[in-house]
Image: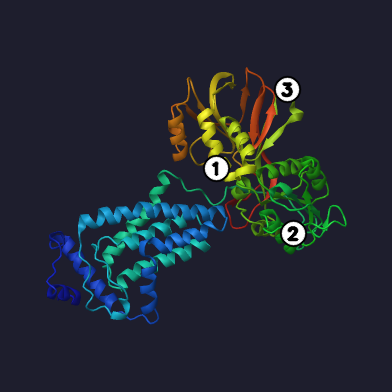
Amino acid sequence: MESRYAAAERRAGRRPPALYRRGPLRRLGRLDRWAFDQVAAARLPGLEVVLPRLSRLADHGVLWFTTAGVLGLTRRARLRRAALRGSIAIAVASPAVNLLGKHAFRRARPVVDLVPPIRIRWKLPTSHAFPSGHSASAAAFATGVAMEAPRAVAVPVAVTAGAVAFARIYTGAHYPGDVLAGLGIGAAAALGTRLVWPARPPVAHVTRTATEKVMITGDGQGVVVVVNAGSGAPAAREGGTSSRDEGQAAPVPLLRSTAQAAVDVIARELPAARIVWLDPDEDVDKALAEAAGRAEVLAVIGGDGTVNAGARAALARDVPLLTIPAGTFDHFARALGIETAVDAITAYHGGRLGRVDVGVVVPDGDAEQEMIFLNTAGLGAYTELVERRERLEGRLGKWPAMVVAAARTLRRSEPITLLVNGRPRRVWLAFVGNCRYGSRGPAPTWRGHLDDGRLDIRMITAGERVPRLAALAAALAGHLHLMPGYRSWDDGTLELASPDGALRVARDGELTALPAAIRISKRPGALAVFCPAARRVGSGAGR
């Protein structure tokens, strides 16, 4: 017995392409039309109006690109990555469906004689039906978001994508087979983005310490919070309500900085915590050492450089560190899974301590001048990039300054001569990561573990002049590992020496002048940090 839609198509004088009139595809076509009949006959109260409007809202990707814009405005790194990956996936899936798929199969749209008119509120599309472009875009965006965003965001986006796909059948625009094919193409496009941009884990693994105890209070008693005034703070204050110069009120800024917003959250949720603002001309190490000396828990609000200084003080006083991100990149805090002040407070109240590795840079023959890094140490072109960025960021802001500095560095940088573990090399760029990094290239940004005991070493060496255009293109594409001079390995130590004199090293984004010979090594599990709950935190005392 032919379906009602098959009969309607016959009366309309329409026949399926020859491809669908024989063999297994004919049977699939019958099943597809039967499923379409069932959806056409269905009556879903309340959705007769909602689904057509949702379908139209998804025209030309408006729904998804608007969602991407909202995610980008949150200032949360995971959500920004989710928005970007979802948008890239649409950019791949949409032309694959509309320019290739539809013209290859040329399947006619369903006859809508039996679809209730209330569902058909706008002009039906005239392009070919197979596969569904709306479904491909929906699946591409939802899959891209799911690869980066937390479940609380990914699930609503996925449900909305599923509703858009179903709406394409419910409104008579597509057969179910069109929609299923579109969903598959969209998901494949999103997964394919991993080939050029590997998805990062939401948080690095940290081994939880089962034996260490720390005093946790509901009001934050015993917590000393040090705030870097350079992270956008308008004034220096101590103790939450009084300024450091008693009797002088702090000015109120028109726009609240990230650091000030974090302080507001701390003051509200941990009212007994002692808050110390750092003055721009203050000795940061001294102030942090004093704060750590009177703290049960040392909390630091600032970027990676401030967190590095806080880690030095926490190590010296053997107190746990609570990181509260307020910088530009906040690599270390985000590796722990802490993206906001609320995340940090939740981690504190949970009382979950973990031990992370610390990278160590020691000048040759002077162990007392040991310096640490939590993320990376860089040499060569990387130090030039940091120096140029610091000169420009006051005028341009950090992100534009980074782009301009990178372009100038790639154009002007020259290799430096180094002895690398005793072997002479001409090094254009050197990267040393605290633990193995997951992404490729000389300057990756995420790690799977913070406690693996290894240094991730990557270099671009040059026998002659580095090809600038090729380097720039490879850097923009994230594939500097394809350059002939690229080398990478992991080890426990690295010895570097410069025959030309002093070395400059950028530790966690901060430049440091060092003697001609240095040794870079690890202190495994040296630093106690607070970790959020329900993340990739192992158990036990060590690895």
Res. 535 image quadrant? bottom right
Task: Kindly report which numbered mark, 1 or 3, lies closer to the viewer in this rendering.
Answer: 1
Q: Local crowd at mark 3 within 10 Å, few (<14), some, or many (≥20)?
A: few
Q: Earlier in the sequence, mark 1 or mark 2?
A: 2
**Earlier-in-chain disc, 1 versus 3:** 3
Q: Is residue 86 above or below residue 177?
A: above
| Residue beneath disc 3 | 365
**Left or right, 50 with reference to 248:** left
Of helix, strand and loop, which one carries label 3? loop
What's the residue at 37%, 56% (across, down)? Answer: 187
**Mark 2 highlights which residue?**
252
Q: Are marks 1 and 3 in contact (CB under 8 Å)?
A: no
**Residue 543 appears in view:** no
Whole-Å distance between the Cαs marked 1 and 2? 35 Å
* Type of the residue with mark 3: Gly
Residue at image location 44% in from the left, 40% down from the top: 477
Residue 293 percent coordinates (x, y): 82, 46
Amino acid type indicated by mark 2? Val
- Across and down, in percent, residue 260 comes to 71, 56
Q: Is the N terminus in the top left, top right, bottom left or bottom right quadrant?
A: bottom left
Mark 1 lies on residue: 445
**Mark on residue 456?**
none
Tag nearer the camera, 2 or 3: 2
